[in-house]
Image: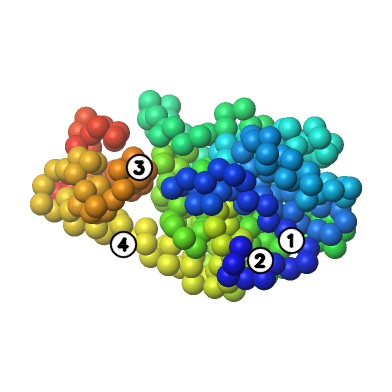
């Protein structure tokens, strides 16, 4: 973590799971000095568990908070809970927090993109929007931020915001329906802007001191992506593969799949708003055209 000096009551342990989607790996945070909260225990990896236990040492863990149910954030939660005898908290299991539109799409057969959803994740304690957790010398406020995933939470600590995968400095978030929802993502960005000036502590990558500016940029990015998709469809019906080529150019092959899922999220939102027509219906293999 190089762009910002961590306060004495925050430690970051990076999991050994680097990839094009996780950068150096998942950031697991320890909040507090004596009685601690763990935010995002990370992937189910013995080396990472050992690293966390070394960093915790003899100190007590009062809470284990999972920002969302992807395996690279939640996979280690149950093992760590048993080792340190602390409850796991989260907004809910996989599928919690989905919009009515995404619930309808899932019921209609829309498949997820295989991004490592932790279907076994069930928190011991539901951490609802606006709830506060307190420990010795710290207080965290939960903010429900669906978009990347329906059960995604951010957590406010003083002038800092733990943002999981919602807002990062090095990349935009994957929004892959039906767990991902681009309309919800943009609404969550607008809500976070109301938090004012904050430093972002994301689930991957470095802290972002100018957090409000970064969130505003992420919102503009999604708005611009929608504009680009609609502009591309002005020339006639397109499938997702050709839209990815047009919108992303010479994207790395291992990122094309994720880019396609982001495009699908926008197309589903446009379909919900009656602006595009999908044939035979909104899916990865469909053809999309503007409604005239």
Of all residues shown, which one is farthest toward the left?
235
Structural crowding at the residue carrying mark 3, measured as other residues with C-alpha within 10 Å and reported as few (<14), some (14–19) or many (≥20):
few
Mark 3 and mark 4: Cα distance apart in space: 23 Å
Label whose residue precedes the other's in the sequence (1 or 3): 1
Helix, strand or loop at label 4? It is helix
CB under 8 Å between discs 2 and 1: yes
Q: CA distance from mark 4 to mark 2?
A: 28 Å
Which x, y percent locates residue 187? 47, 56
Which residue is identified by label 3?
254
The answer to whether any part of residue 144 appears in the image is no
Closest to the camera, between mark 3 and mark 4, is 3
Instruction: Judge depth for marks 1 and 3 and give the one in front.
Output: 3
Mark 2 and mark 1: Cα distance apart in space: 11 Å
Q: Secondary structure at mark 3?
A: helix
On the picture, is 173 further left or further right than 40?
left
**Which type of secondary structure does the marked residue at label 1 adopt?**
strand
Residue 264 percent across, percent down from the top left: 32, 42
Give the numbered dot on residue 261. none
What residue is shown at x 59% (from left), y 67% (from top)? 2
In which quadrant will I find the N terminus? bottom right
- Report the residue at 51% width, 43% height from top: 149
Q: Which residue is mark 1?
A: 10
Q: CA distance from mark 1 to mark 3?
A: 34 Å
Q: Are marks 1 and 4 in contact (CB under 8 Å)?
A: no
Residue nearest the viewer, comparing 260 with 17: 17
Mark linked to residue 160: 2
């Amino acid at each position: 973590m190089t762009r910002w000096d961590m306060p004495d009551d925050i430690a970051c342990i990076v999991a050994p799971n680097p990839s094009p989607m996780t950068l150096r790996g998942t950031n697991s945070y320890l909040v507090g000095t004596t009685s601690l909260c763990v935010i995002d225990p990370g992937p189910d990896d013995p080396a990472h568990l050992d690293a966390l236990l070394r960093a915790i040492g003899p100190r007590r863990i009062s809470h284990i908070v999972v920002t969302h149910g992807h395996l690279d954030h939640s996979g280690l939660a149950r093992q760590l809970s048993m080792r340190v005898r602390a409850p796991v908290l989260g907004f809910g299991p996989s599928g919690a927090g989905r919009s009515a539109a995404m619930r309808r799409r899932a019921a209609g057969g829309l498949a997820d993109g295989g991004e490592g959803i932790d279907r076994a994740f069930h928190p011991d304690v539901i951490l609802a929007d606006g709830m506060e957790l307190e420990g010795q010398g710290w207080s965290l406020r939960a903010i429900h931020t669906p978009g990347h995933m329906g059960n995604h939470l951010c957590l406010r600590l003083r002038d800092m915001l733990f943002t999981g995968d919602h807002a990062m400095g090095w990349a935009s978030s994957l929004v892959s329906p039906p767990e991902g929802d681009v309309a919800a993502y943009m609404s969550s960005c607008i809500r976070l802007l109301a938090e004012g000036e904050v430093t972002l502590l994301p689930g991957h990558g470095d802290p972002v001191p100018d957090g409000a500016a970064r969130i505003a940029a992420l919102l503009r990015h999604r708005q611009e992506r929608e504009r680009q998709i609609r502009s591309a469809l002005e020339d006639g019906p397109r499938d997702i593969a050709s839209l990815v080529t047009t919108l992303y150019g010479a994207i790395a092959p291992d990122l094309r799949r994720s880019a396609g899922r982001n495009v699908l999220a926008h197309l589903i939102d446009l379909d919900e708003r009656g602006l595009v027509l999908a044939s035979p219906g909104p899916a990865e293999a469909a053809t999309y055209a503007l409604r005239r």
